[in-house]
Amino acid sequence: MIFFTRFHKPHETATLASMYKPSNVGINNYKSLITMWEENVAIVREVSERSPGVTYQELLDADTHPVPDVLRLESTKSYGPDEFPVARYTTREWHEVEKEKLWSRVWQYACRVDEISEIGDYYIYEIVGKSYVVMRSAEDEIKAYPNACLHRGRQLKDYDGRCSEIRCAFHGFAWKLDGELKEIPANWDFPHVEGESFQLPEIKVGIWSGFVFINPDPDAEPLEDFIGELDDHFKEWDLERRYKEAHVAKVIHANWKIAQEAFCEAYHVVATHPQIMGYLGDTNSQVDVWDNFARVISPGGTTSPLLKYELSEDDKLRTMLDVRHDEELPVNVPEGETMRAVAAQMSRERWRPMAGDWVDSMSDAEMMDSIDYTLFPNFHPWGAFNRIVYRFRPNGDDHRSSIMECIFLAPYPEGEKPDPAPIHWLSDDENFSDATELNMLGKVFDQDVFNMAKVQTGLETTQKTGFVLSNYQEAKVRWLHQKLSEWCEEE
């Protein structure tokens, strides 16, 4: 059943979709079509069907440790029409709308606080052809500036680093770290330039759990309001007390949403990652949607309902550890116990040297499950001890390529926090599995990336004007497009 928040007949969705021809659409007509489409996107779908097999909440009932309240929350929502427009991935016109309506106004993760820990440290954040300098301007202050000299516009900084002043390499105009004008060479020739009017303009900055966010919109709501209840969800896991253990990035030959959406559902596991079906309950994932954030929790240590044969508890463990059948397992599952509980305890012991006795308070779910949160539009911090943080963004001003980043945030023993890992850029010829710091995860990423450029080509080729999403399993993807509609609609 579908509930329409505006009065449209069901056949009108298909009629509007047929108007979304990628070619021969002027920008004004295109924006008019967007407005018409947005009215059809504002649909809330009733979702009652679920995959056969054990539910996520039933798995939590069997946990050997107390389960945190945050994992007991459920917020089932599904948005949108039967189809969304292909043009969102393929047309320059939609990319221009995103540039104007989204990336110039939304809060977006730039760097970790640890990456600009000393006064004068700065980090360059770039998005859709624009560049920003995020800087530690004082011991307790972080500022962000457009990366442009106020004289003739040259970029002020070309790469990350540390400085005692902000000096343009073109003519030598210079500013203090707090943005105050410091020097104009041959200033006698600039009587029309006054110091106050030549203060570097500031971009809004917010900090959450050790992450630095920026927002180019001077009228944007505070980051705390935008994040909302997400902060409460992560109080259990304290991402601020982590260090950046790894950071790997690669240019993907597909729109940023294609790359991101591959990590917003577990429905693709059966075809893309069949090797993990023996220990991941893919279609039994729980999908929760709130306002500006959503999550998918995929249970580990339980088999996929789509697997057509049963596995013993030992074989589930063998599959997870990638141990061949002619090799001995490092540990066997005792009779009467589950692989999920045994593997969770193995994980606790793995993390004990870094996290101490904190691990003893962690549930099996926190040790085993993929708890993938997304803060709109492109920031993916994972809960518990998964370490993973994803970020997806357009590659420069190109709507047909994107940057995919995987960051590991790891706990560390009491004492001095380790230095953050530098970013490891993979070339076009390198795979994620070549980044040994990602361990086995790199192989899984390679399987995901294998699809992405082919999805882009397929969407460029298809004669359909819309793409189809499931009601529940892909509800997080539906939510992303609902949020895009809210941000990119005509004013």
Image: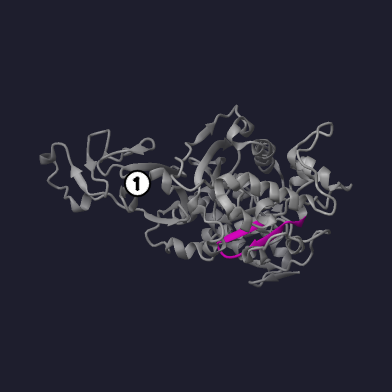
Q: How crowded is mark 1: few (under 14 residues within 10 Å), some or many (20 or more)?
A: many
- Which residue corresponds to mark 1? 135
Query: Residue type at mark 1?
Result: Met
Q: Position of residue 294 (x, y in %)?
A: 61, 59
Q: Could you tell me which quadrant the N terminus lies in?
A: bottom right
Q: Which of 402 and 352 is in front in this view?
A: 352
Which residue is at a point 47% across and 36% down the rendered structure image?
Answer: 422
**Is 286 rendered above or below residue 155?**
below
Instruction: Kindly identify the residue that appears in the image at 62 percent across and 64 percent down.
Output: 70
In the rendered structure, the answer to whether residue 116 lies left or right of residue 253 reads left
Corner quadrant of residue 471: bottom right
**Residue at x 36% of width, y 53% of height:** 203
- Label 1: which secondary element: strand
Secondary structure character of the magenta stretch overall: strand
Q: Position of residue 133 (x, y in %)?
A: 36, 44
Task: Give the x, y percent position of residue 71.
Answer: 65, 62
Instruction: Look at the image and say whether residue 290 sits in the magenta stretch.
Output: yes
Q: Is any atom of residue 81 visible in this view?
A: yes
Residue range corresponding to the magenta coloring: 284-296
Which of these two is toward me, 280 or 48?
Answer: 280
Asked whether residue 301 appears in the rendered view, the answer is: no
Q: Is residue 326 above or below residue 332?
A: above
Above-or-below relation of 370 to 13:
above
Instruction: Tell me: 320 left or right of 95.
Output: right
